[in-house]
Image (tube, grey):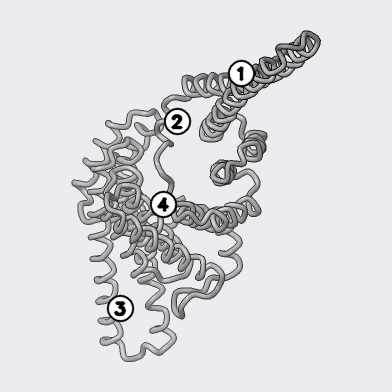
Amino acid sequence: MALLMLFAQNMSLDTNQELSALYLSRGCNELAVHEMEKSIVKHFQSSLTWWSLALTCIHAKDFSRALLALKESDYYLQCEITNKEKSVKKDIKEDETLNSSSFLSIPTQKDQFVLSRNLVLLMASKVCLKHTNQYIDGIRYAQVAVDVAIGGFEKIQALTMIGIGYISYFRRSQTSSEREDCLHKAMDHLLHALKIFNGDGERGGGDIDDSIRSRMNDYDCKRIYYHLALVYAEMRDIDKAIEYTRSILSLDGFHTPGWNLLALLITSNKQYNKALDIVNHGLNDSPNDVQLLLTKASIEKILFVASWTDLLGKTEMNHDNVSMKSNDINNNHLHHHHHAHVENSYFELFNRSKYNAVSTYQKIIEIFNENKETIISSSSIEG
């Protein structure tokens, strides 16, 4: 899909690129990277070849090499944009018959390369934030993508990536002032992206048509809402965080991260039974989602501890009541009977809570053992 959007070049695959694609299809990632590097020797100044090498390295999970390839691709794209501008200006200067309509078509030729550069910059930002933990570089790449964006759609993606970058950097910050600054910057960029999406963007880069907006509802808008909810949650504005989380679920009732986040937000108000209902609702559609199951297990553990504490308290209270009336034989017998009934009820609740928590943890272990590699590879933060 990315390659269909990419470069305004008509390059046929050489032998090394064909071999690389073949090795990738068979899971031979190192051989695929090796063949793409051979192709680089033949097409060293081709931004498309560097991009292809970057994608191959990402597939092989060699993210440091992928980032180097993306930097080279960006450099040669800038050269191609500059050369295109010089070529057009030269044609206008030499051909006096060019009219204004021809001149208006010039930006369209350059825009193809600019769109390609925007995609390369966003991919470099994603690699930095998700795989190499280079948060400052990831934010910088996304900021350049904002600067070169030629439309609202591209600008929204870049602003969202900056917001995600500041959230990631917030989690690694040491001082309270630095953490607070990261949260405010993340919120500013995400709200800016949402403003453009709603049609309130600045002139010359903010407007997006209805067809793009409807397509963005499927992904970008939910991503903005989700990360805004995370920011407000970290700021302890739980009501605002819940509002944005519910906005996600109104767009997509199958959004499991949204159900998981909503449950966690509800637990902050100590409404554990309500949070458990929310998790179970999410699990109806995604019964093997590990994050939802972990949240469910944690809530069940809290309820288990609460039932154990309650059981101890009720048992002690009933013992005290019995001892106070120990002089009356009939009352003593009645209270012992009542004490046994209450104690059995609480033991039943205690055992049920214990069983629920243990069975959920057992299911998580089973899923993890069956899908260990997939879970590990997908455990990083999203862009």
Q: Residues within 10 Å of mark 1 (few under 14, many from 20)?
A: few
Left or right: 174 as drawn, with respect to 234: left
Q: Are marks 3 and 1 in contact (CB under 8 Å)?
A: no
* Amino acid at the residue labelled 4: Leu
Secondary-structure class at tag 1: helix
Q: CA distance from mark 1 to mark 4?
A: 51 Å
- Write the residue at 30% across / 40% down: 57
Q: Is residue 164 above or below residue 376?
A: below
Q: Is residue 271 above or below residue 198?
A: above
Secondary-structure class at tag 3: helix
Left or right: 361 as drawn, with respect to 34: right
Secondary-structure class at tag 2: helix
The x, y position of residue 227, in whole percent, is 47, 54
273 vs 320, nearest the viewer = 320
* Label disc, if present, on residue 162 of the rendered structure: none
7 vs 219, nearest the viewer = 219
Q: CA distance from mark 2 to mark 4?
A: 27 Å
The x, y position of residue 264, in whole percent, is 54, 42
Q: Which residue is mark 3?
A: 88
Q: Which residue is mark 1?
A: 355
